Image: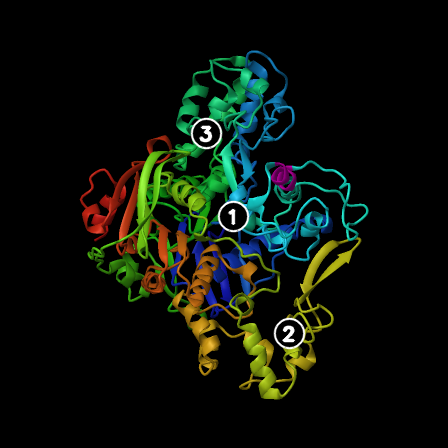
Amino acid sequence: MNKNIVIKNATTNNLKNISINIPKNQIIAVTGVSGSGKSSFVFDTIASESQRLLNETYSSYIQDLLPKYKKPTFDSISNLPVSLVINQKRIEGNSRSTVGTITDIYTNLRLLFSRIAIPFIGYSMNYSFNNTQGMCPSCKGLGEVKQIDINRLIDFEKSLNQGAILFPTFQKKGWRLSRYTESGFFNNDKKISQYSKKELDLLLYSKEMKPTKPTINWHKTATYIGVVPRIENAFINSETNKYKKELNDILTINICSSCKGTRLNKRALSAKIMDKSIADCSNMSINELFDFINNIKNEEVSVILNELKKKLKSLQTVGLDYLCLSRSTNTLSGGESQRIKMTKYLNSSLSDVLYIFDEPTIGLHPYDITGIGNIFKEIKNKGNSILFVDHDKDIISISDKIINFGEKAGVNGGNITFYGTYEELLKSNTITAKAFLKKHTINEKEKKFSSFYTLDNVSKNNIKNISIKIPKNALTLVTGVAGSGKSTLIRYLFKNKYKQATLLDQSLPHASNRSNITTYLNIYNEIKKLFSKENSVNSSIFSVTGEGACNICKGKGFIKLDLAYLGNSTQICEKCQGKRFNDVALSYYYKGKNISEIFDLTVQEANEMFSDNLIIKNKLEAMINANLNYVKLGQTLDTFSGGELQRLKIAKMLCEKSDEIIILDEPSTGLHEADIEKLIKLFKELINQGHTLIVLEHNLSIIAQADWIIDLGVKGGSLGGKLLFQGYLKNFLNNKNSFTAKYLKEFL
């Protein structure tokens, strides 16, 4: 049997006739600068073809329920095993999703309590905070309550007619505002500050009722209800995701006073095993819970106990022993999310599987990377193969073989520039080798800061009563091992106090499936104007959502089929061949290219083409500075990686020239070491514009350029959450308690 995966002449995206034999049962690293072709090779060719072929073995009905994979372009691929992709995306969960629920450990724990807890209160549903039998009636199983801050909702120095209600759905002449101005209850020109207590209660908190003397404009079937319950019913207690940002601006979140954050009712909390309730168990660290379970000696529940220990052991193996089951999944970092996904496979008996990882070191401190290497070796020893994309020197060094793509990005990439061992790579003339061998220095400047943003005596998760200060108009790096409390401190506690702070994370912006760079950066209209002026026609002809759209696919480039025997599926539009525009729009040219060909240009190519248009050029140069020069103008945002989305948001912020607080979570994600310098220059440009940058990061090249350091630790979970250092970088290097300082010193 052939032990190699044999690929011949792969040309997916920017790949240049790639032919290679990849050995099975090996750890293979794929490296190269951003946009060099790594993802095209690993995910769009190997993973896509493996999963596409696997899906074809199912019935048409089942295929419709599975993800759709476009056939990659190549001459042949042979000996391709079944692949499993473990990506870098955060676990998407709502406010009811916890580490316990996502790993099914809480399910096993509920079973255990339903069997042996005293007193017996019923079966496992009685311990579920997602079921009415177990949830706290006050917070509905959320553990916290959202309350509207009236001072953020109401401008007391304005009248109703002047727009005193600040929530956006209460705009002037809107129907929601009319429920108050036409109710007959109020003097609409009277300032809210002049209302009596009775009037204010009526405006804000009134229960639903029929007005006794409304105006003639009052809708006959309408009822009156206070502003606060109206917003709660329409947006807070409903499933809608509308006005999420605006709601966050007026809401405060507090621990539920009834259940004290446990999410459960008193009955569920009354049942105990060895003096511990199920909430007590959920709040233990994984290590503590493992010891607790290990001390239960009961043959009747041995199967449940063994299952619990097996799952807890998996979390310990991937270095997540500091987490607790009650931790909400939306507070997990990207690295923690990916490692939770890894636990599914550690106990698997499958062999001859190709495991594909997308930047497995994301969110990992250098201290934690050894653990990932051990996981790879364990998976390999079970007879599996590992293929991973990464930029981290430490994890790349443990691989059996390295495939390096380049030499540069986009049309200048797509070639294999090196294939061999790590030792051979360091002797090569590749950009990757040069970046690994480069000498590094730290930012030794000590800026004098006149003002700071502060947090005093804050606590949340493992953050226990710490105080920090962050200098304004500076680059602050928040560091520490995984689980030390960085995300909790900044993404939750700091953001909750400083509502004006903008979090530029790796999530997809709210956009349609037609959204691309040109629409996100607001340069599409400018491009349409150029076509309009050049051809003396109306600019609407070039609109993909209007006159210019293909009349078959309506400007989407694909059509959705709804066949009774096949279910729903999509295919490239036969009329426009995926170009999205109609023949009229495609018949006009600007500098020798039609509108579809413009969208097929990379950012670098488009920047050269529109060099005489400052509006377009300035925004495209921001994209280039954000290491997105290889992306095509027409690439839809839903196909961007998390790191690319974050850098796109940074580029847009750079164009807007404001002076906000910007929070960045692991901006080095997806970046080659050679690209980090450009990112640092981008940070400095944002600071020169007046921004304050707060960056959560493990990349030592970025940490070395900080103006100010806040380091948490010492380790993760209950052993973390302590402030180890805050101050200038130069003083930080001699901190003997910090793992970050230790690795940074070695890095230099």
**Amino acid identity at mark 3:** Leu
Region of the chain picked out in magenta, as a range = 198-205
Residue 496 in the image: above or below residue 171: above
Q: Which mark is residue 744?
A: none
Which residue is under mark 2? 543
The residue lying at 73 percent from left, 72 percent from top is 551
Indicate the secondary structure of the residue bearing disc 2: loop
Judged by its main secondary structure, the magenta piece is: helix
Residue located 53% across and 53% down the image = 80
- The foreground one among 254 and 611 is 254
Picture coordinates of residue 537, whole percent (x, y): 65, 85
Q: CA distance from mark 1 to mark 2?
A: 35 Å
Residue 199 among those drawn in magenta:
yes
List x then y, in percent, for residue 674. 32, 63
Residue carrying label 1: 249
**Amino acid found under the numbered disc labelled 2:** Ser
Residue 400 shown in magenta: no
Q: Quadrant of residue 535?
A: bottom right
Front position among marks 2 and 3: 2
